[in-house]
Image (cartoon, helix red, strand yellow):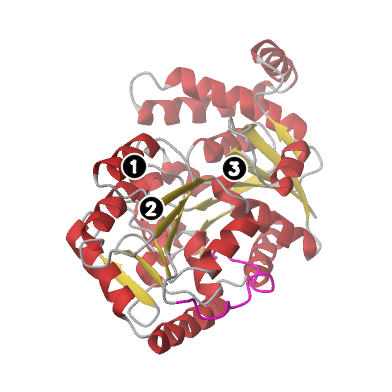
Amino acid sequence: MRIGYLMNTYPVTSATFIRREIAALESIGMDVARFAVRPWSEDLVEAADRAEAARTHYLLAPGALRLLWFFLLELLTNPRGCARGFVALWAMSRAAGQGALLRHLAYLLEAVHLKRASKGCAHIHAHFTTNTAAVALLCHRLGGPEFSFTAHGPDEFDDPKASSLALKLAEARFAVAITQFARTRLALAGGPQVWDKLHVVHCGVDLDDLTPAPPPPDNAPFVCVGRLCPQKAQVLLVQAMAELVKTHPDVRLVLIGDGDTRPQIEALITRHSLQSAVELRGWADGAAVKAALSGARAMVLPSFAEGLPIVIMEAFALGRPVISTYIAGIPELVDREAGWLVPAGDVAALADTLRKCLETPPERLEVMGATARKRVEERHDLRASAERLKALFEGAAQ
């Protein structure tokens, strides 16, 4: 069975879970075509991501004139399909508010290209409920394959009316939520009539590649992995470190990732004289991230907004506890048996929790790490998640 995976920007260094999901599906017999609206604008650090980019069909690659030509051909040969597409386009653009019509016209051009490029695909699966789901819906209205999508959150649920989430749920063959939290948001947006379409399929990690690491040394650093951005709140983590060094002067933090808030983070490091305590490594490939997490005392992610970060699963699989926040799907995985949760935005609570982790006996950290590993084995095995997705795709085709 050949299916198409549709993403907005792909591949992306901070979202390798989609590449791994596709690879897992292919390992169990699925034939997956990659489609994306555009390539990532930054350098890809992983060789596997660079190979994925070469295999991906980009919808905007032909340019505006050629996309318009594709649309004119579609209009001449498929007027009824185009009429159905225009009805959906008009409904979605009105719901999105003033100024959205032009954007949705662009989605229609992308949908025409997707229909042409996805010939032979029995189904299209979009990651995220935003523009990719809109393009998949319009493609289906034009006469293309049926579609489904995966909802991650949290910003996808900020304004479900403006994103026409109810319409997308009504027309999708099914929808996947990565957490129970995400499923409840889909259920609220779509109403009881779509509840039987909603399925929770957890994102997974390759457990064979992430074997538990030996206990860390006493001077092991905290490690934070993720794009440097307001949503992940690494700025607050540096502020917490400024408090923590007053009582634990040898504490260290490694930040892996890059992004918009790097200048603010660098300024805070300088202001609080944390040059020897906080290390900014920038983007790293999977092997370097794995090595950093294996050598960590704990993984820390003080986010304001998340779905359920893959890096938490990776840290758990390596036997490392996690410090994170009470938001979205994170409490579904992290609790006091395998880590610590703090209120998002509370620097004092974050500093206090880092201190508690530093003062936790090694034997207790080892027990927490073993609990974390077992939890990921039970809930986030990549192959098991791929088998679940395969069953949904085959059911949709039937």
Q: Would residue 210 be counted in the magenta stretch?
A: yes
Instruction: Tell me where the magenta segment starts and ends, as one range.
Output: 200-217
User: In front here: 77 or 26?
Assistant: 26
Q: Secondary structure at mark 3?
A: loop
Residue labelled with disc 2:
278
- CB of mark 2 within 8 Å of CB of mark 1? yes
Image position, residue 121 (x, y; %): 77, 45
Query: Residue at 54% across / 41% down in the picture?
Result: 133
Q: Is residue 159 left or right of residue 318?
A: left
Q: Closer to the camera: disc 1 or disc 3?
A: 1
Query: Residue at 70% across / 63% down in the picture?
Result: 390
* Upstream in sequence: badge 1 or badge 3: 3
Q: Would residue 391 be counted in the magenta stretch?
A: no
* Label 3: few (<14), some (14–19) or many (≥20) C-alpha neighbours in 10 Å: many
The tag on residue 265 is: 1
- CB of mark 1 within 8 Å of CB of mark 3? no
User: In front here: 159 or 309?
Assistant: 309
Image position, residue 331 (x, y; %): 35, 69
